[in-house]
Structures are given as C-alpha cells and as structure tokens.
Amino acid sequence: MPLITILAHASLCPEGKSFEARPGSLLCETLLGHGIDIEHACDMACACVTCHVLVRQGGASLTPAREDEEDRLDRAWGVEDCSRLACQVVIRHEDLTIELPRYTVNLARETR
C-alpha cells in the first residue's frame, strides 16, 4: 500500500503525519479518515477549491487533472504546478507527499 506523507501544517496537522492508504481511494476521504480535517465545502463534488493540496512528490503517478478540476484550481489560493483538488485525486500505488496550503478560499467552513 502506498505511504501518504502530510507535511506539517500549523492548524490541520502541526506535527505532520504519515500513513498507508488504500489504492483506489480518494485522497480527501483518506485524509479525513486519518484525522486531518481538510475542508471540503462542496461535499467532494469538484464544485469548490477548499480541498486544494500541493502534491510535492508522487504526482507523476496520478491521473492528470480533468478540465473541470483545472478550471476550479484557477480560483484557489497559492496554486502551483503541483496543485490538485484532494476530492479528485485517486490514490494509486505510488507514495505521495502532500502539503496543505496555508490558506483556503471558503466563506463558511463545514465540518465532517
């Protein structure tokens, strides 16, 4: 199973975290299942950008972002070439290193 490494984030994951993930699962659901309270205001429907992540390592193993995801990412804070929406990333068999952006674009934070 692939190892998912989350880099330290001041509020969501202060110490950083690593865990194994099931191939075929969505990154957003996996993060939530491991106690990382990533925002997902559209209920993981690729209709917002609150689950924006930076895939620092392993991104080449992922399927490319679809056009609707890329269109949404244009509205995210701090977008880089490695930006993805966690609700659209299907975990494959390769390890991933993920950075959670410092800010998110959300007017009303929803909790799980």
Image: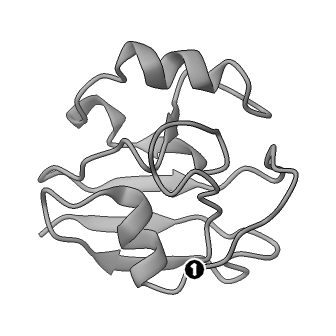
Query: Percent from the top left, x then y, of residue 70?
Result: 50, 18
The residue that appears at 44% across and 55% down in the rendered structure is 97
Query: Percent from the top left, x then y, of residue 30?
Result: 36, 71
The residue that appears at 57% across and 79% down in the rendered structure is 112
Residue 1, above or below 27: below
Type of amino acid under label 1 = Arg
Residue 61, above or below 51: above
Residue 5, above or below 63: below
Residue that mark 1 sits on: 112
Query: Percent from the top left, x then y, of residue 58?
Result: 32, 42
Dot 1 alpha-carbon crowd within 10 angstroms: few under 14, some 14 to 19, many 20 or more: few
Instruction: Tell me the element at label 1.
Output: loop
The residue that appears at 43% across and 66% down in the rendered structure is 5
Q: Describe residue 100's horizontal placement relative to residue 33 as left or right.
A: right
Q: Describe residue 4's horizontal placement relative to residue 111 as left or right.
A: left
Residue 6, above or below 61: below
The N terminus lies in which quarter of the figure? bottom left
* Quarter residue 16 falls in: bottom right
The residue that appears at 52% across and 86% down in the rendered structure is 35
* Quarter residue 54 falls in: top right
- Looking at the picture, tell me which residue is in the foreground, 108 or 7: 108
- Looking at the picture, tell me which residue is in the foreground, 22 or 61: 22
Query: Percent from the top left, x then y, of residue 6?
Result: 52, 66
